Amino acid sequence: MLGLLRSWRLRGNPVTVLCYHTIGPDIGGPDAWTVLRAADFRAHLSALQQTHDIVGLDQAIADGPGNRGKPRAVLTFDDGEAGNHRHLLPILTERQIPVTIFVATGQIETGQPYWFDQIMGALTASAAIDLTDHGFGRWNIPPNPGPSRWAAVSALLEALKRVAPDRRSTIVADILSQHPLPAGRPPLGPMTRAELAEIAAIPGVTIGAHSHCHNLLDQIPVDEAEASMARSRSLLQGWTGQEVAHFAWPNGNHTPALRQRARRLGFRSASALDMRLWRASADPYALPRLGIGRYDDVTRLRLRLLET
């Protein structure tokens, strides 16, 4: 039965593009969906290499879906979080696999984490959050790590994503006043420029743009969004010496107008988050990816690949 399901899923020889965010230690680390344990990522690689050829994004685009032969998988990482340097870099050096890292440049330029990483880094234990002054009521974050706790944090993040950036900044500041980040380098935050340059120099690593502001680009004026996309690419090219030819939409949000701007800027692709496989009909400026996170161990990954 599983063999038949897998054959049906792979009809037309699609490309499987996985979207990770960052890698963390096997023990401890932030209990956030975006932080996959290093041991789980290693297990993912071993499982994928049994069934897929792991290829770079450029090769996948050149070959396209429908290419005959072994199924192909592309590995991508969004945001440019410091765990990519601490924990992903050693694995890439050891395993020599191609990956694309989409980097949001604003946080690297300033050294300050984006709002969502600040909240995930601050809410590391049981927390009661009072946002009644903002019309957001009260939120209770349970103490025990795991999917149930993450569901509560995720609900808060999703609610804040729907708020205009200026108002969201005020609400985030209030949350952090109630639950300050720990002293020192935050639990979740950006790579430094030197760390980014180091990982970019590894053979097989492609650096892509992920905007400068990391706003949901369909929530801001399209000209502002285009400027953020262009600035991200320009900074990354200067910092890494790489051509930056690919883009990923923050949170996966895009519109026809934004896709047109990505094409006009000269990007060769733009990746979304549609939780499906990349088939021949896909728009190259809305390439579908499967989001993979902390609670997807290798067994869950195999099931996820059969669900799409």
Image (cartoon, helix red, strand yellow):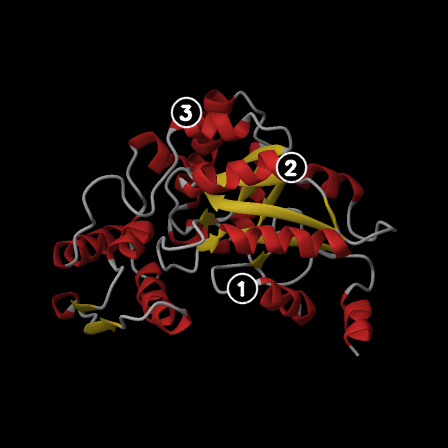
Q: Is residue 177 above or below residue 200?
A: below
Q: CA distance from mark 3 to mark 1?
A: 31 Å
| Residue in the image at 27% along x and 73% along y | 142
Indicate the amino acid at tag 2: Arg
First reached walking from the N terminus: tag 3 or tag 1: 3
**Figure quadrant of the N terminus:** bottom right
| Residue 209 visible in image | no
User: Which is more foreground, mark 3 or mark 2?
Assistant: 3
Q: Nearer the observer, disc 1 or disc 2?
A: 1
User: Which residue is disc 2 drawn over?
Assistant: 268
User: How many residues crowd mark 3 within 10 Å: few (<14), some (14–19), many (20+)?
Assistant: few
**Is 116 on the left-hand or right-hand side of 65?**
left
Badge 2 marks a residue whose secondary structure is: loop
Q: Which residue is mark 3?
A: 194
Q: Could you tell me which residue is drawn at 14 percent across and 70 percent down?
A: 132
- In the rendered structure, which disc, 3 or 2, sits on the residue that comes first in sequence? 3
Q: CA distance from mark 1 to mark 2?
A: 30 Å
Total numbered labels: 3
161 or 155, which is in the foreground?
A: 155
Amino acid type, mark 3? Ala
For residue 28, the mark is: none
Up/down of 69 relative to 8, above or below: above
Dot 1 and dot 2 residues touching (CB under 8 Å): no
Q: Quadrant of residue 167?
A: bottom left
Task: Find residue 226 and report its horizontal and vertical position in percent.
Answer: 46, 38
Q: Position of residue 157 (x, y in %)?
A: 33, 62
Q: Decide if residue 132 is on the left or right side of residue 225.
A: left
Whichever of callouts 1 and 2 sits on the residue coming sooner in the sequence is 2
Q: Quadrant of the C terminus?
A: bottom right
For label 3, the SS is helix
**Residue bearing mark 1:** 296
